[in-house]
Every structure is written in structure tokens, then in C-alpha cells.
Image (spheres, grey):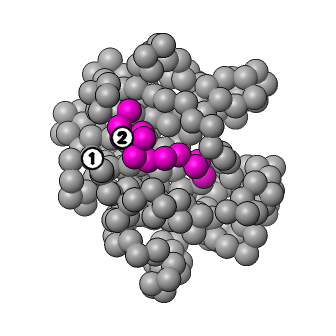
Amino acid sequence: MTSEAIVLAGGLGTRLQEVVKDIPKPMVDINGRVFLDYILFLLAKGGIKRVILAVGYKHLVIEEFLQDPAKTYGMEICYSVEDEPLGTGGAIFQAFGQVQGDAAFVINGDTYFDVPLADLEDFAASRSADLAFALKIVENSSRYGTVNASAAGQILSFDEKVSGSDKQAMISGGIYYMKKSLISARAKPAKFSVEQDFFQKDLEYLNAYGKVYKGIFIDIGIPEDYELAQTLLKNI
């Protein structure tokens, strides 16, 4: 099994400024634990041995926190530091420079999604996929871009979020398995959006699939869901 993961931990947390200030978004407090701790626990449980944290804004706060070996759950922690914001795509592509194997899991640093990583990789292998998304069915899709997939799971399109839409929909849950070969195959500028400039724009070249999972899912990007996380993650 792939034992490396990239965590996007450089977010500014702009929409959370009314409840948390002056810290990277993954360092917000959830029930007396920083949110990043939940993510690292999930990765260790899933068999990850090496984590590359894609960091930027106030990254020393994260590095200081993880100096305590008890916080790393036995995993090796590495840092891919952005000197300036690179966007989600630029951050991922830069971090892949430190990936030692042929693939890695990529995790959004503001999302907790309890997905069996080995199963996601097995699914990717069963479809010969270079990119495999953990998908989630949500009842209110207004916050998210949606995903359309075939019965076999092949990703057909990524659609932009529609403000005011509260319908049930399938979304990317912020965890995916990605082959390192995609980095060299698709030339990109240093700064770009992985969602718009890679997943959407280059979809026909990506051999991308997705599988729906039912595990606990929460994106803490807005104050309402930050508060909801206090309840959802209480017993993790």
C-alpha cells in the first residue's frame, strides 16, 4: 500500500477569522485538540508512514506543535514550504517533489473524512486510475462544487458550486489518491488551482475515478461547520 500522504496545511482560514485568528486553519481548536491532530490520527490509522505538509502562512506554528513526537503518531513528518501562496495546485505539485514513491494520498487540511485509504487505493488499481477521489453524498451542496461520475465511477465532470443550491449532490470529499506521474505529464505554472486548472481543465487526460464513502465528513471552512465539527468529532 502507498504509505505517503500530502496534507494541504497552508490555508489562511479567511472565512474563519470571526472565530479564530492568527493561526493556520488546520491549527484551529476542536474540542481541545487542533484540527490537524484529527487528520494525522486518521492518516496513521490508515497505514500512512510519511506525511508531507504543504505549509505557508505561519508554518512555524505547525512545526513547533509537531516537535512533540507524541503528536506525529509514529509517522515521519516533512515540510513543503511555500514562500508565497501557490494555490492548491502549486502547493500539491511542489509537495510531490518530496514524495519518494510512485503515488501519494492528498488531503485537504480543513477537511476530515473517515475513508479507508487502502480501499481507495485498491479501487484505483481496479480501474487502472491515475487519480481516484473519495466522494461523499451531501444533502446541501450549496458550499461545494459537484462531481458527475459514470456507474463504474469514471469522473465525467466537475461542476462549479451554485450559490443558493441546497439539493443533494455528490462532491469530492477532499481526499484522493494520485499517481506522481501526473506531475510530469501535465506542465503547470508555479501558482494554480488544482480544482479549476487541473481537475476540470485536464480531466480528459487524467483517467480519474471516484468512489462514494459514508464515513464522517466535515469541512471546517466556514464558522457554522467549524461549530458542527465540535459535535461530529467529539468521540474521535
Q: Amino acid at mark 1?
A: Ala
Q: Which residue is rendered at x = 33% and y = 65% of the image?
A: 50
Please name whichever residue, 231 or 83, is drawn nearer the observer in this view of the structure: 231
- The answer to whether the residue labelled 1 contacts the one labelled 2, judged by CB atoms less than 8 Å apart, is yes
Picture mark count: 2
Label 1, label 2: how far apart the Cα atoms are: 10 Å
Residue 213 is covered by the magenta coloring: no
The percent coordinates of residue 47 (x first, y second) are 40, 59
Please name whichever residue, 155 or 82, is drawn nearer the observer in this view of the structure: 155
Residue 18 placement: quadrant: bottom right
Give above or below for 211 relative to 55: above
Residue 39 placement: quadrant: bottom right
Q: Which residue is rendered at x = 42% and y = 41% of the image?
A: 119
Q: Residues within 10 Å of mark 1 (few under 14, many from 20)?
A: many
Q: Residues in magenta?
A: 112-123
Q: Secondary structure at mark 1?
A: strand
Q: Secondary structure at mark 2?
A: helix
The percent coordinates of residue 195 (x first, y second) are 46, 34
The C terminus sits in image quarter: bottom right
**Residue tagged 1:** 103
Q: Residues within 10 Å of mark 2 (few under 14, many from 20)?
A: many
> Is residue 223 visible from the viewing direction of this image?
no
Give above or below for 134 relative to 31: above
Q: Is residue 72 left or right of residue 76?
A: right
Q: Which residue is rendered at x = 45% and y = 28% of the image?
A: 210
**Residue tagged 2:** 121
Which of marks 2 and 1 precedes in the sequence? 1
Which residue sits furthest bottom? 68
Residue 119 is covered by the magenta coloring: yes
Q: Which residue is rendered at x = 80% and y = 52% of the image?
A: 228
